[in-house]
């Protein structure tokens, strides 16, 4: 019981005594019994409380939501709001006397009641009440017979004012029944036997019915909290009631909760970025208890660690933790009943996922043996039909991702076979699920991700010890075989075996096992992702997999972008938005570490990205480490300028393995940037052979520095200056060096459209001196995607319609 009233020595006529009374009432009222609370949460209630989104409706219009929404949308016709003033006048000007607060387990009903009590104590809301009595129906032991006065006295055993005297002023009283359905009482009672005297002792059912029907203390106010599944019988007893339904946290409130939970702002930011980057976790954060679960798990991960890039708690781990909390005090004396219920629940979930079904009829619930009042409300919400609807009650999982989690459990849980044969609904065929996902059913992605998470060794042990479920070891082998064969089929014959699907890294990160990842990726050599917007979660998944990918030889992220998008930012939807901030730099720091720690990595391609100068500087740190053996670095369309060229020059002076550097389409590079690069290239230790500077807005002022490199610097065999409007004197300086027999250059990229006849003749004269030299517009053999060109800040025609490439120097494609 949560006792809430103690009036002081005398009657509550004195305002000061009432204030002291309220303080005492609230201090003694709360014990942490609701799921999602912990002993240390009580003193920090004010700090952590985050306003919930609710809807209000009169009883004639209310119906419970189906529980499948992915966010906070309003239910029914009520407008969404975030206030806790539950007894304010409604739209018709009337103040409700009976408020029913509805919400699934973990949605924050008890927290909302608790907030009402705190606000009442402080005198900020609900000041029309002098006495508030709160009965925790989940914990109370009530007598078989009692009067209303007895209930009040039992709430406050130290009450010094007679309960009967308090009850005389009915308008000043608020009675709260928290978790009303837990009383399990019959609400079908004869009207003639109801009581009108608050001192009259009656069977408990009759006393409670008298309160609901307003035959006793009719002017007192009632606040009743309950789950949607229990509304059916209660609503028949009430008149003029108003319903307040908790919809959970809005996007803004989710972030606010993280900041309230974590005392350290930087940890709060880090934790929220982690959750926001994982679409499954972020979607689940609409449920307050899931927010608490995620914050609790991340707090444990952050303890003693600098960041969450080392986080081992994947989505599946948090879901299992949530499940263990749900089942913490359920059927401990009869685990077989609980196990059978879970198996049947998983079967229902899987059946629904296959059929794109989220609503289940009451008959289905009974057919699956799930009609158990002590367990069902923790997993399924009940939607009661409105008047005029001809179907019965329907049920839905509290959240779609929870249904997907239980669907995954269906495929990997071991059972004795009796349940499956008795239901005969769906075959436990993991391969069929995986094949369907691979071919067309991309909506199964989350279910497949949970599959990988559930078969990790940690999950197997956790499910066995904490939840009492056994996971089939055969499922691990099937998942491994599927991953290996999947990417072999995507690679072309004769080419390197590459992984080009981001979901593969999600699956492996979800499992989070070094040996499994090594086996899954062991036969592949290339990572090739194109045109992907990578979140922090993607980055963590990639980072984990690359660390354990010994055979990785080439990384290509062409068209990929690393971004952090503010969920509250209001932007024009027609404008693509990429913000380069902490996340992007964090990404480059990880890539720098990759270059240092992964000596087998030979090629890194980050074309058409938003790297910028700051990102390139971080990459350069990795390129300068002794462990870096990178041979090819391609940074096309990376929005870099001359500001980062000094860092690149330092790399070229110190790196002993880089053979190709591609900075094409970096329009901010200009001549000044190229001159800085040439400073670094003058050192003989640099093994660079290919330098691509096509379409970098070069005018020719950098040609003297480039010409000097042809004989004094590294043995450049390919220099691409295509699609740059080079002045004649610059080209002539290059020609002068090319005449020297010791010049090693074999490919020179030039766009000759606009060259004078004299300059063309000068180039033609090189042929007998350098018969192996190929001159032409090299970019025409590697035209970038139109989308990439469109994203350039200034777009010039890449290739002229009629280029004046020398006929005698035409060759097959050079690249």
Image: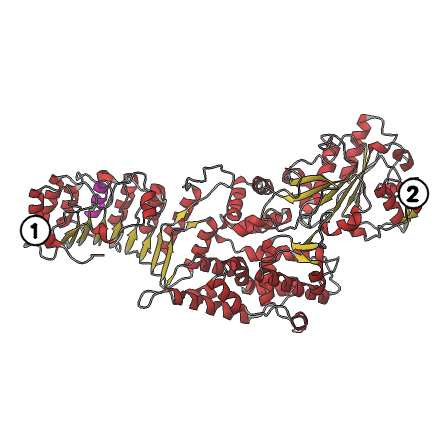
Determine the residue positioned at 26% across, 47% down.
664
Residue 406 image offset from top left, x and y in percent? 61, 60
295 or 560: which is nearer to us? Answer: 560
Separation (CA) of disc 1 from disc 2: 113 Å
Residue 538 image offset from top left, x and y in percent? 45, 52
- Mark nearer the viewer, 1 or 2: 2
Determine the residue positioned at 63% across, 63% down.
346
Residue where numbered disc 2 is placed: 195
Magenta stretch, residue numbers: 674-684
Residue 461 image offset from top left, x and y in percent? 59, 65
Name the element at disc 2. Answer: loop
Of callouts 1 and 2, which one flags the residue occurring earlier in the amino acid sequence? Answer: 2
**Disc number at residue 766?**
1
Determine the residue positioned at 27% across, 42% down.
645
Residue 383 image offset from top left, x and y in percent? 69, 51
789 or 562: which is nearer to us? Answer: 789
Q: Is residue 131 in view?
A: yes
Report the number of discs: 2
Determine the residue positioned at 58% across, 50% down.
284
Q: Is residue 446 left or right of residue 245?
A: left
């Amino acid at each position: 019981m949560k006792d809430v009233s103690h009036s002081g020595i005398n009657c509550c006529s004195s305002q000061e005594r009432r204030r002291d009374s309220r303080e005492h009432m609230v201090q003694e009222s709360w014990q942490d019994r609701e799921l999602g609370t912990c002993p240390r949460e009580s003193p920090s209630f004010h700090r952590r409380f985050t306003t919930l989104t609710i809807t209000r409706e009169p009883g004639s219009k209310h119906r419970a939501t189906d529980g499948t929404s992915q966010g906070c949308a309003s239910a029914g016709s009520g407008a969404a709001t975030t206030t806790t003033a539950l007894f304010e006048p409604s739209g018709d000007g009337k103040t409700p006397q009976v408020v029913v607060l509805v919400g699934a387990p973990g949605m924050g009903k008890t927290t909302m009641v608790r907030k009402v009590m705190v606000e009442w104590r402080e005198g900020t809301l609900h000041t029309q009440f002098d006495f508030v009595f709160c009965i925790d129906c989940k914990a109370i032991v009530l007598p078989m017979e009692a009067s209303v006065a007895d209930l009040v006295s039992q709430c406050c055993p130290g009450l010094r004012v007679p309960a009967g005297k308090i009850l005389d002023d009915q308008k000043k009283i608020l009675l709260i029944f928290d978790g009303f359905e837990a009383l399990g009482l019959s609400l079908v009672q004869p009207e003639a036997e109801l009581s009108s005297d608050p001192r009259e002792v009656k069977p408990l059912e009759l006393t409670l019915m008298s309160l609901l029907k307003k035959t006793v203390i009719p002017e007192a106010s009632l606040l009743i909290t309950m789950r949607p599944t229990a509304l059916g019988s209660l609503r028949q007893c009430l008149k003029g009631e108003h319903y307040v339904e908790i919809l959970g946290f809005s996007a803004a409130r989710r972030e606010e909760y993280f900041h309230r939970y974590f005392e350290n702002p930087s940890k709060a930011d880090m934790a929220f970025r982690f959750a926001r980057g994982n679409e499954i976790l972020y979607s689940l954060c609409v449920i307050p208890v899931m927010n608490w679960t995620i914050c609790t798990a991340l707090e444990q991960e952050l303890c003693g660690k600098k960041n969450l890039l080392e986080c081992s708690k994947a989505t599946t781990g948090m879901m299992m933790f949530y499940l263990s909390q749900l089942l913490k005090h359920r059927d401990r004396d009869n685990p077989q009943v609980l196990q059978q219920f879970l198996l049947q629940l998983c079967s229902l979930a899987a059946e629904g996922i296959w059929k794109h079904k989220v609503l289940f009829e009451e008959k289905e619930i009974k057919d699956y043996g799930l009609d158990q009042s002590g367990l069902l409300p923790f997993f399924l919400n009940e939607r009661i039909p409105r008047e005029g609807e001809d179907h019965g009650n329907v049920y839905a999982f509290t959240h779609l991702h929870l249904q997907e989690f239980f669907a995954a459990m269906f495929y990997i849980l071991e059972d004795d076979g009796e349940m499956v044969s008795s239901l005969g609904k769906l075959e436990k065929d993991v391969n069929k699920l995986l094949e369907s996902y691979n071919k067309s059913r991309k909506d199964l992605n989350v279910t497949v991700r949970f599959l990988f998470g559930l078969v990790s060794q940690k999950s197997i042990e956790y499910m066995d010890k904490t939840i009492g479920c056994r996971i089939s070891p055969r499922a691990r082998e099937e998942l491994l075989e599927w991953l290996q064969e999947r990417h072999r089929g995507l690679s072309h014959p004769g080419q390197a075996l590459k992984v080009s699907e981001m979901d593969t890294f999600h699956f492996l990160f979800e499992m989070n096992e070094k040996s499994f990842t090594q086996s899954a990726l062991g036969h592949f050599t290339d990572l090739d992702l194109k045109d992907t917007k990578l979140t922090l979660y993607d980055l963590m998944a990639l980072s984990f997999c690359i660390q354990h990918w010994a055979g990785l030889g080439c990384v290509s992220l062409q068209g990929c972008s690393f971004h952090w998008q503010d969920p509250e930012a209001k932007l024009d939807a027609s404008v693509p938005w990429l913000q380069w901030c902490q996340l992007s730099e964090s990404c480059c720091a990880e890539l720098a570490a990759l270059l240092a720690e992964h000596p087998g990595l030979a090629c890194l391609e980050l074309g058409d990205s938003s790297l910028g100068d700051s990102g390139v500087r971080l990459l350069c740190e990795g390129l300068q480490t002794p462990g870096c053996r990178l041979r090819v670095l391609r940074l096309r369309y990376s929005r870099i300028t001359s500001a980062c060229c000094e860092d690149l020059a330092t790399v070229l002076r110190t790196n002993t393995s880089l053979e190709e550097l591609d900075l094409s389409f970096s329009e901010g590079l200009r001549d000044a940037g190229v001159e800085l690069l040439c400073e670094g290239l003058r050192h003989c230790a640099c093994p660079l052979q290919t330098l691509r500077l096509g379409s970098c807005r070069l005018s020719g002022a950098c040609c003297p520095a480039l010409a000097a490199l042809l004989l004094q610097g590294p043995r450049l065999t390919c220099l691409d200056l295509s699609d740059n409007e080079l002045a004649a004197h610059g080209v002539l300086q290059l020609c002068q060096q090319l005449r020297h027999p010791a010049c090693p250059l074999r490919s020179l990229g030039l766009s000759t459209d606009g060259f004078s006849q004299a300059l063309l003749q000068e180039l033609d004269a090189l042929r007998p001196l350098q018969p192996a030299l190929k001159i032409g517009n090299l970019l025409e053999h590697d035209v970038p995607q139109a989308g990439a060109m469109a994203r350039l800040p200034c777009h010039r025609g890449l290739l002229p319609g009629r280029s004046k490439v020398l006929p005698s120097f035409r060759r097959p494609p050079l690249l």
